[in-house]
Each structure stands twice: as structure tokens, then as C-alpha cells.
Image: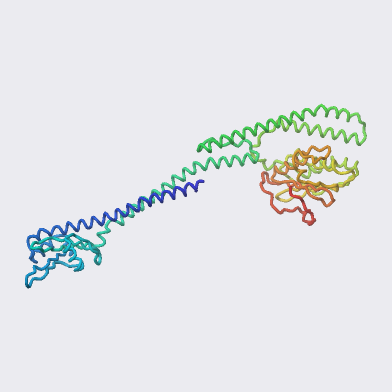
Amino acid sequence: MRWALVKVSLAVTVMVVLAFALPLGIVVKEMARDRAFSNAERQAATIAPTLTVTTERRMLDRAVESTPAGADGRMAVHIPSTGELGSVPLEIGIRRAAVRDIATVRRIGRASITEVSGGFALLAPTAIGAGRIAVVEIFVPEGEVSNGVDTAWLVLAGVGTALVLGSVAVADRLGLRMVQPARRLAGAAQELGEGRLGARVPEEGPPELHSAAVAFNSMADQVVQLLANERELAADLSHRLRTPLTVLRLNAASLGDSAAAEQTREAVAQLEREVDTIIRTAREAKPQTSAAGPGAGCDAGEVVRERMGFWSALAEDEGRTVRVAGVERPVRIPVARPELAAALDALLGNVFRHTPEGTAFSVDVHSTEEAVIVLVSDAGPGISDPAAALARGNSGAREGSTGLGLDIVRRVAEGTGGDVRIGRSVLGGTEVRVWIGRGTGARARPEGRRTRRGARRGRRRTAEV
């Protein structure tokens, strides 16, 4: 927008300067020409009184030399013969005009200008009596005709250039005044999109941008209010779970000392901890105003080991073969520990919920400099519609499913600039691949990236969701 205004201003100013400077330059040229010939006419008029008194050569020579034009050799006098026997025409000075031009002026009795070598000649007729007409010739050099024209053109060019530069400078300032509020608005919108809900813009600038800034600030305030309401609702709903959880805990305490009873009590305790975490997070959550620091996050390997330790007991009871790989070394990711644990529980819970008992599954963690990839594979029947499975709230018509599990996983991955993909695993069932960016706030996931496991498998295809 800024450069568009500058270009428009430049074009308009150039047209205006040309519309005024060209005619003015032509007028200056004509004025210089008129001034030179007017001066020549005055020079010719100074010799007229002498011609009316005498035509004697000696007197005329003296009169011609006494004039500025005559002293410079630019005046000539052409006197016709008297018509008497033996009389000849008299010419004083250097003739530059053609004889026929002199004869024409003598015949019409009116001054005329004719072009000669090196300039122009003014031919002025003067009556000298007895019906004779003398012609006074004044030579006007080319430089005198255009005297001052070049200077005038330079002045006009300088003034025009100054006007153009001034117009461009003013347009640039006006454009900057319009562009800066637009840039601030775009920057605030980007910050809001990145989750920094404290982003606001100054309500200033042109009326249209001022209105846009007011609308943006109002929208941001409403977003913050809606999120606050959502946190309160989540906290209230979670708090309502405390009563049935208390009943479950009391009932689990009376189950005895069997392995199943211990597992049930552990599950109830874990559920209580998760509910407490949800309530605490919802109550204390604040709008994000900056990215997580370099020390934020958790060790993905440690969290995977911990959650697999929890789910392995149930897997053993159901006769499932479990394989875990890639968790031997620390793998730091910019995801909070509770969030990653919730995502893993959602993925593993889907395996137990939607595959028959005895179905094998595996969890693999692959780490690179840019990302950490978590693969959860099973040997079950697979997912016929991966896109629908990832849609929030879509249970896929499966009993006991809320449709929020994979959405939790997806939000964790997308919070780091990654994504979630569902495809066919080498075990024959479903493979859920969670791509977690290691740089907080990463924007784009490199296309064509393949995991080390995917490179080994070669023929494995995943469906883009």
C-alpha cells in the first residue's frame, strides 16, 4: 500500500509538472525571440531619421557606425538608385539577406524577418522621398534569439524535480501513517493466533484502521473471556467427579489384596490425581503471553516408560504382547508432563478399548534434532476412516468412545508445530504417528520427512489427515 501511494503520487506529480513546465518553457522561448527582434527593430529605427535627411554615403557610414548594431557589423542599409542615368543602388554594411527578400520588403512596405546563415535578419523599410524606399537590415545572431532560454529550462527542471521529490516524500509519509497501523494489526493477529492472548493494538490511524483495531481488541477480549468461561466449566465438571470417585475409592479398598484389586485401586488413585490436575490447571490457567522457555517441557522417554509401566499390568492380564523401543535415553520435548501423559493414555486406552484381548501393540520413540516422533501400533482391525477418527467429538459410532481422545493427542502435537497421522501398521492394525516439534512454536513441518523406522519399512504408507 505504501509503495502504491508513492507510485500514484509520482505519476500525478510528473503529469502536472509536464503540463505546466512544457508550455511555460515554450512561452519563455517565444519571449526571448520577441525580445531579440524588438531590440533589432529599435536599432533599425535609429537610422531612419538620417535616411530621411540624406543619402550620402559618408554621412550614412558615420550614422551606421554610431549605432550599437552598426559598430558590431550587424547593420546594413540598402538604398535603391534614383532612376537617373548613371545612378546605382547604394549599400552600406554587410548584406546577409537575399536580394529577393530585400526587394519583397521594399515592395510590400512592411518589416519582415528572414532566416540567414548563423541567425536571422530583420528587414525594415524606410521611405526616403521621391517614392524611393530604403531597407535597413539588422542581423540577429542565433544565440541572441535563444538568450536565457537554457537557463529558464534548467530552472523549470529544478522546480519540477523538487516538486516531484516533495510529492513522493509526502506520499511516503502518508503511506507510512496508513501502513504502520496495518502492520501492527497483522502482528497482533499473528500473536493471537500463536496463543499470546494478551496481544492488543493501539486504536489509532485512519478511520478504517481505527475501526479495525477497535474490533480486533474487542474480539481478543471476548476470546479471553470465552477461554476463562471454558476453564471454569472444566473445573466445575471435574469437581463434580469427586463424589463418584470417592465411592469408587472406598469400594476398591474393600476388594481385598488380589492383583486385580490392587490394579483397580491404582487406577482409581490415578483417576483422582488426573481430576485434581484438571481442576488445578483450569483454575490457575492464564492467557499465554510468551513462548515456553528453553527449559520447559519433559522427558518423553521417562513419561513413556512410566505410562507403559501402568498399562503393562492390564496388557499382561489380557494376554497382549507389548514392545517398547527408543526410551532408553532422555528425550526432551516442549510439552508439559501431564499433557504428554494424557495423550499417551488416550492412545493406549484406544488400543485396549477397540482391539480384542490378546492383540499385540508397540510404542516406539524416534528422536531427531527437529522433532520427536511417537508411534503407537497395534495388530487390531484398524481404522477405516482416519479423518473421521481425528475429528473432535466424533466417536466413529464406537461404543464407549467420546471422540475426544485423539483430539487431545492432536492438540498436544499441533501445540509444538507438529501433527498426528493415522495409517496401517506393520503389525496389521492401526499406527498412530505423533510428530512433536522440538522447537517451541515451530510453524511448518518439513514435507517428505520420514522416520528411521519408516525408512526401514519403505512400503509403509500413511494417510494424511
Q: Position of residue 383 (x, y in %)?
A: 81, 46
Q: Which is nearer the eye, 246 or 377?
A: 377
Q: Position of residue 37 (x, y in %)?
A: 22, 58
Q: Which is nearer the eye, 113 or 296?
A: 113
Asked if 326 appears above or below 118 in the picture, the reply is above
Left or right: residue 67 versus residue 118 is left
One can see residue 15 in this view: yes
Extreme residue in the bottom direction? 86
- Residue beneath the point at 84% across and 33% down: 268
- Residue beneath the point at 75% across and 33% down: 278
The colour scheme is rainbow
Left or right: residue 128 versus residue 267 is left
Report the number of numbered marks. 0
Asked if 169 appears above or below 203 in the picture, the reply is below
One can see residue 341 in this view: no
Q: Position of residue 66 (x, y in %)?
A: 12, 60
Q: Position of residue 231 (x, y in %)?
A: 71, 32
Left or right: residue 224 versus residue 336 is left
